[in-house]
Amino acid sequence: EFRLGGQEHFYLEPNATLALPLEGGGLELHCSTQAVMKTQVYASHVCNIPMNKVVVRMKRMGGGFGGKETRTAFATAAAAVAAHKLN
């Protein structure tokens, strides 16, 4: 008899965000995400600023297999709020 339980993959990149405040109340976010627009929506929502004031930048990614779509949102939202409030 052989049993095999559920299996999750291991994402190679850590969840990370660098949030930089911009002049005029905007934000520039450098983050590890596969969903740039979702990240922009979440950050603009938690900071209560228009989406066009949020610039999201990311480098090429590998090894995420879709797992970096929304799992990075918590780190990005926290960094965005901190940068926005402390500006």
Image (cartoon, rainbow, N blue to C red):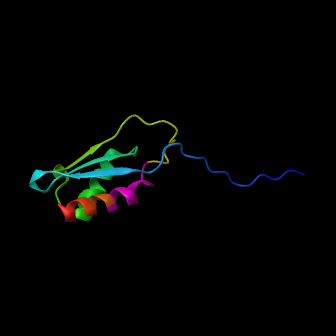
* Residue in the foreground of this view, choosing between 25 and 2: 25
Specify the farthest residue to the left: 24
Does residue 33 appear to the left or right of 46 in the view shown? Answer: right
Query: The magenta stretch spans which residues?
Result: 69-78
Q: Nearer the viewer, residue 22 or 6?
A: 22
Question: Residue placed at 27% from the left, 64% from the top?
Answer: 46
Give the left or right position of residue 5, taking residue 74 as reference.
right
Q: How many marks?
A: 0
- Tell me the residue at 41%/53% (across/down): 72
Question: Outermost residue toward the front?
Answer: 86
Work out whether 69 lies above or below 61: below
Within the magenta stretch, is there residue 81?
A: no
- Residue 48 seen from this side: no
Quarter of the picture holding the C terminus: bottom left
Residue 10 placed where, x, y %?
59, 47
- Give the farthest residue toward the right: 1
Judged by its main secondary structure, the magenta piece is helix
Residue 22 visible, this angle: yes
Q: Position of residue 24 (x, y in %)?
A: 9, 54
- Residue 33 vertical placement versus 87 (above, below): above
The image position of residue 70, as x and y in percent, is 42, 53
Q: Residue at x 16, y 53 (%)?
A: 26
